[in-house]
Each structure stands twice: as structure tokens, then as C-alpha cells.
Amino acid sequence: MAEPLLRVEKLVRRFGGIIATDNVSLDVAAGELHAIIGPNGAGKTTLISQLTGHLEPHSGSVSLGGRDITYLPAHRRCALGLARSFQITSLLLDFTAADNVALAAQAHAGTSFRFFANARKERGLRDAAHAALNRVGLLHRADVLVSKLSHGERRQIELAVALASKPKLLLLDEPMAGLGVTESQGMVKLLQELRKEVSIVLVEHDMPAVFALADRISVLVYGRVIASGDPAAIRANEDVKRAYLGDQHVVTHHG
Amino acid sequence: MKSLTVSKAVTALMLAGLVLLPLYSQLAGNVFILTLFTRIVILALAAASLNLIMGFGGMMSFGHAAYLGIGGYAVGMLAQEGVGSGFIQFPVALAASALYALVIGALSLRTRGVYFIMITLAFAQMAYYVASGLARYGGDDGLTVYKRSDFSGLINLGNRTQFYYLCLACLFGVLFLIWRIVNSRFGLVVQGLRSNEQRMQAIGFPAKRYKLVCFVISGMMCGLAGALLANNTDFISPAVMYWTRSGDLMVMVILGGMGTLFGPVMGAVVFLLLEEFLSQITEYWALIMGPLLLLIVLFGRGGIMGLLGRFNRG
């Protein structure tokens, strides 16, 4: 098997006496959509934060495309092709949608130590921003302040921002959080499109969405990966049923 | 966009007033007003520089007056040692300010919020006490600058009108630079950091580097104001670095409108004029000034600029 795009090996992170990430190992192959599920407090966000560089692990390693990135700061990982969306929408509220996305493009297009020329008039950056906004279906909102956008729209902007950095791997932390039914469906459709272009690690509570989208699923319980496999295998796994899928009917219903 | 017109009109009026002021001073035979406004223009320049980090960069520096002292002492000390050329004094003032900003910034920018305010304040007070200890340069009593910076006939700083226009040109030049910077790639990154630092790092910007460069640029601009100030008063003393002066600069920025290009200028004009005229009426002028500032800040969120903006909509 070829070198996986993302390899996590024996990652450990403690908070005081609590082991939030307990010897987690997982691989994400190029082109794969790998979902991470688990009940509340299973340590999903802690895990993601170690992948993005917002939190340092106590031991273990993370490598991207064969390169060890365990202790690289967030902005360097981003330069290597790792982009994330936040569980709680984290955008520049007093900037327009286009500005938010254009900044992400700017981060990957040469130096930003340019002090004189008007950045909003750089065609390359604006075009990239508009392309990414178009990709998530929000081109018509490009010049609206993010603070004036709806929650659902902001989730889409999060994606557009991540896309604008032309990542190899997209880490999505609960992109459906707080979305209505129609909005969720739209997001699933969008992710189905995006996964053709970029590898994705998806952390999500919305089970129908996960089982519809994922190539592989890892189940996290109390910081440990208790099962990893394709959706069918996870659905059939007894441990998973017992530990996590109390709301089993959701899964069977979907199948 | 209609809401912009009132503030635009007032701004234009103010700028025109500043340009035409020497003419008025000449016609009315009022020398005092030119002296007063020279000081206003210089402090407006300092406030504008503070606004770059405070308004646009979200870095609440409570030690900005230190640069006024550093710029001023660069001029005063060099003059004392017989180096009278402005072509040397001014670049030294800028370089010294930049160096101070680089060191202070590298240390202070590890902190944020209240800690950043306190640490910048502490460093400025340190600079104040260092200056007080410079026995050779007057110590506590300050240093008289017997000869203004000499620009070898290019411009005569001894001439009130010429000096005023030099200060005004510096102010306009700095405002122009700030305007360009704020809309540049660099400026957008700095404003993005003010808005959401975590997000900016996640999309690939190393926060500290950008903030530090912004901090240094702002410090140099304020150092320039310091060099002009020493020439204006023919005197420099540790008092210009005292924390109350840093506070005054903050008030000017907040009063005029943080994060607006002309707000700090407006703030400086209003603040210093109020100070001047209230102190003529009563020695307890601060009693009137305080509540007045409070009202403007409370009811005019966004300062005078914000107030003018709302004026139109209402």
C-alpha cells in the first residue's frame, strides 16, 4: 500500500488525569473521506486540534505525506496543505465573505509583507475567492459582511475558506453543526462534490450524513479508537453498537 | 453610502482648516493659534500612529508616549553634542524608535489583553525613568534644544509657518501611508488578526511576525512626532513620556474614532482645543472635560466619526 496522506501513530494527549487521546493511530489514504465519530466527550475535537497544530500531543506522531508534522505550528501545516474548518464557526465577522476567502488565498500566494498596493484589487486573489465562493454556492453573497450572514451561510463560508487554500487534506470539524434539515442536505451534496477533489477527515454527529459520505469510519470512545473500517463493517460491529450507537435505529434506518 | 457624507464633509472641512490656518493666523495677527495648532498637528500624528496598532491592529498599547520621548531625545541629545543637522537627527530618531519598538514589541506581543496594556505601560515608565536619570542631558529637568534641526536651507524650522507646514506635511504623509498600509495585503492580515487570530493562524499566517512589524511601523511614525515635538517646544523632558501622555493619546484615538483614518486627527483637534479653552475658563477644567469625554464615548460609539456617521442616518 502506498504511503497514506495522513498517518497518526500512537497519539497521546492528557488533560490532568484524563486521557483525552489514548494511543490513537489512524491512516487516511489520498482521495479518501475518513469520518471520525464518537459520543460527546470522546475526544474528537482534541484529536483534530492535534492534527491542526492547535494542541501539542504528549507522545506519538502525526505525519502528512510522509513528513513529520507533530510539532509544527498551525500556520506551517497549513502551508503544507492542511486546511480546517472550525466546529464553532470562526470567521472574520467584520470582513466581507469575499475578504475572508481572499485572505485564505493570499496566505498561499506569495508574501503578505506588501505594504502599498491595494490587496482588494489583486485580480488573482479576488478570482480565487469568487471561485471558492461559487463552489459552495455563495457567490451572490460575496460582498456581504459575515456578521450579516445566516448560520448556515457561515458554515458554507468556512468551507470556502478552507478550499481557497487549495489543501491536500481538509479537516472538517462538524460542518453540519446547527444546520437545519435542508441546509444539512445541501452540505452533504456539497461534500459529495468536494470529496472528488480533496481528501477529507470529517468529524460529525449527523449519522445519516456520515454513513452516506464516508469511505472509512473510525469510532472514538473515551479517547480510544475502538473500531475502524468501512461503513458496513462499522454498522455490523458489536462493540460499536454497544458503546456508541445507542441510537442504533438511525443507522439501520439509513441502511 | 449616504451615511458617509456628513463625516466626509466634516473631515474635509477640518483638513482644509488645517491647511489654511497659517493664512488666518497671518491675517488676524494671531500668532498664538499657529503655535497651538502646530502642537495639535504633531500630537495628531502621534495619535494616528497609535491608531494603526490600536484601531486597525487591535493592540492596546498604553505606552505610546515613549516614542515621543525617544524621538525628542534623539534630536535633543544630538543637538547637545553638536550634531545639528536634521538629516542626521530625524533618521536617528526613526531608527531609535524602531529599535525600541522591535525589542518592546518582541517581548510584549507574547501577551494579550490587559497584560499587553500593562506591559507596554511598564516599558514606557521604564523609558521615563531612564530619561530622568540622564544627568548629562538634564535628568528630571529636561533638556533645552538651543537650535532647531537644520535642514541646510531646504526648510527653516525656526520660521513658524514653515515649521507648521512641515508638521502638516508629515501628518498628511503618515495618513497617506496608513491608508495604503491598511488596504494592502499586510494591512488586511493585521486587521484579520485583530478580528480573529486563531482563524488567521489556521489559514496560514504566523500572527506574531505581522503584529511586530506593524508595531515597529507605528513606533517609527510616533518617533517622527517626537522629533517634531522637541523642535516645537525647543525642549525635551521625561514628562513627555509619562503615562498620562500615553493616556491622552489613547483618549484622542478613542474620542475621534478607532480604526478610522481621520478619527485620531479629529480626536486630537477636539481634545486639545477643549483642553486649551476649558483651562482658560477654570483651573478645574478636567472636571468638565472628563464627563464630556464620557458622554461622547458612551453615546457616540465609534467616537466622533461614529457620531457623525449616525447623524446622517437619524
Image (tube, rainbow, N blue to C red):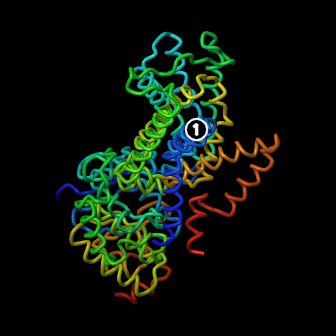
Left or right position of A4 against A242? left
Secondary structure state at the residue bearing disc 1: helix
Neighbour class for label 1 at 10 Å: few (<14), some, many (≥20)?
A: many
Please count the marks in the image.
1
**Res A193 → quadrant:** bottom left
Residue at the bottom extreme of this rendering: A253
Left or right position of A16 against A187? right
Instruction: Out of A71 and A178, give the one closest to the viewer.
Output: A178
Residue A136: percent from the left, percent from the top? 31, 75
In the picture, which quadrant includes the C terminus of chain B?
Answer: bottom right
**Res A149 → quadrant:** bottom left
Instruction: Out of B150 and A105, give the one closest to the viewer.
Output: B150
Residue B143: percent from the left, percent from the top? 61, 17
Residue at (53% x, 16% y) in the render: B77
**Res B140 → quadrant:** top right
Residue A222: percent from the left, percent from the top? 50, 62
- Above or below for B234 versus A69: above
**Chain ID, mark 1:** B
Residue B67: percent from the left, percent from the top? 54, 31
- Above or below for B72 versus A241: above
Residue position for label 1: B34
Give, as a three-letter code, the residue at label 1: Leu
- Does the image show residue B60? yes
Instruction: Out of A198 and B154, give the one closest to the viewer.
Output: B154
- Does the image show residue A236? no
